[in-house]
Every structure is written in C-alpha cells, then in structure tokens.
Amino acid sequence: MAREKKHRSRGRRSPFAAAALIGAGLLLTGGVYAGASAAMASTTDAQTSVTTELTAADGQKLFTANCATCHGMDLQGTKEGPSLVGVGELAVEFQMSTGRMPLQMQGPQAPQKHPQFTEAQIRAVAAYVQSVAPGPTYPDSWVTEGKPNPDDSSDEVSLAKGAELFRVNCAMCHNVAAAGGALTEGKYAPALTSTSALHMYAAMVTGPQNMPVFGDMNLSTQDKRDIIAALVFQQNEVQVGGFTLGSLGPVSEGLFIWIFGIGALVALTVWITAKSN
C-alpha cells in the first residue's frame, strides 16, 4: 500500500507544468512565425528590387496583357479605345498613376481611383509607348519643383502670376479655388487640391478627357511652372476665413444662407408670434 502511494506521488504533475508547457508552445510558435515573416519579407524585398529594374520590353508584355484589348496591339486603337500614337509616356503615366486606366466601364468620364499597377510597372508601360509612338515626355525638375529656369537668369517664380494665369485659363472649369466643378453631360473638372505637380503639368500638356492642350503658344513652360507653384502653395497653405463650404462659391454659400439664414428668421418669427399670443 505504501509503495503504491509512493508511486502515485512520483507520477503527480506539478501545478506549474501546464503553464510551462503553454509558454513553451507559445515561444515555439512565435519563433516559427518570426522566421517565416522574415523569409517572406526578404522575398518581397527581392521581388521589389527586381520590379524596379523593369524595362520597355517588360512594359510591352504588360501592355499586351492589360491594354491591347482596347488600344490594339499596334497602339492604333480599336472600337473600344482610342489610338495611343503620339500621346507619349507622360500621358500614359498620368492615366495609369491616377487609376483612370485601365478603364473599369464606359461612361461620360473615366473616374480617378487607386492605381492597379506599381510605379515601376507604370513607368515600364510608359517607356514602351514612348519607344513605339513618341510624344510628350517628363518635364525638367525645375518645372514641377517651383524653381527658376536655369537657362534664364532673369526668370523668377511668381505665385501671383501663376494664380492669375490659373484664374484666366483654368478657373472656369476647375473653380477659382481649384475645388473642381460640373461640366455638361455628366462630366466634371476634378478638384486639384491633392493633385501632384507632375500630374498638373501632364494635364496641361496632354489634355486628358475634356481638358484642352495648353501648348507653348498658349502657356509657356515658365507659365506652367508658375501655375503649378501657385496650386501647390494653395494646397499647403492653411485655409482662413471660416467655413469653406466646399469652396464652390455662390452655390454653396447661397444654399447655406437659404437653409440656415431663412430658417433662423422663420424660427424667430414663430417665437415672436408665440410670445405675443
């Protein structure tokens, strides 16, 4: 009997054994997960380094798989999409980086959405189009960075001139505050409150969708630079003067006064009438 009790006492587990077993399991699982995550991260980094070295030949493959259905294998266009001859790499970069292309469905206007390709892939497709059907290309850095023209020592960046040029040439569609506006037949001019400097230049040079092309006879490169600088300054500037109401001018302001101003007058009239009675 004593031997049996002694045998049972030796076989009894410690109350901390379960906790120790769970802890060991968690440590083992965490180690395996950390190792797998590190391996996946290294693989992703390797893939990223590969994708950053894409060439025009890679762009041709991407174009054939994703764009040729509408634009044709020879870039001449089809019934579903226009020709890309002469649009250049700048137009391709603009359309794909803003998510307007590939087009999801036919409509009055291609909406802006999250891009479906990486920046390296977009640049590769643009390089392929440029090699086959050249057109407008990327601007010099001084144009999009708001710097003076290095070839003209007398040229200086002018925010006031840029704002004036925007008001005269662009505000009738994009609104004087660059908040965008409605056009005819369900079309619209998009807001420029978050548009990059490169895409502002691309829009002026390539004329996407309803926008006209502003050549050097209309706006010189210096003029385009000043417009971009003024819009970027407006994007970064703190808005003052109370509620912007969407910066849509008399439309939103009149609606606000009609709803709240007239509403307050009606409420005051009802209150005075009730008091008088």
Image: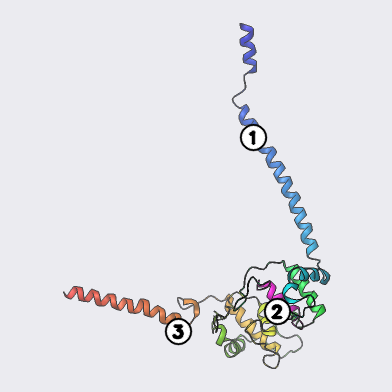
Residue 86 picture quarter: bottom right
| Residue that mark 2 sits on | 79
> Residues under labels 1 and 3: Cα distance?
67 Å
| Residue that mark 1 sits on | 23
> Residues under labels 1 and 2: Cα distance?
65 Å
Looking at marks 1 and 3 on the same chain, the residue that comes earlier in the sequence is marked by 1
Give residue 213's position: percent from left, percent from top: 67, 87
- Looking at the image, residue 2 sits to the left or right of residue 51; the answer is left
Is 228 magenta? The answer is no
Residue 250, disc: 3
Give residue 134's position: percent from left, percent from top: 79, 82
Q: Amino acid at mark 2?
A: Lys
Q: Amino acid at mark 1?
A: Gly
If the image is split into quadrants, where does the N terminus sit? top right
Colour logic: rainbow
Position above or below: 188 against 50: below
The answer to whether residue 146 is visible is no
Helix, strand or loop for disc 3: helix
Looking at marks 1 and 2 on the same chain, the residue that comes earlier in the sequence is marked by 1
If the image is split into quadrants, where does the C terminus sit? bottom left
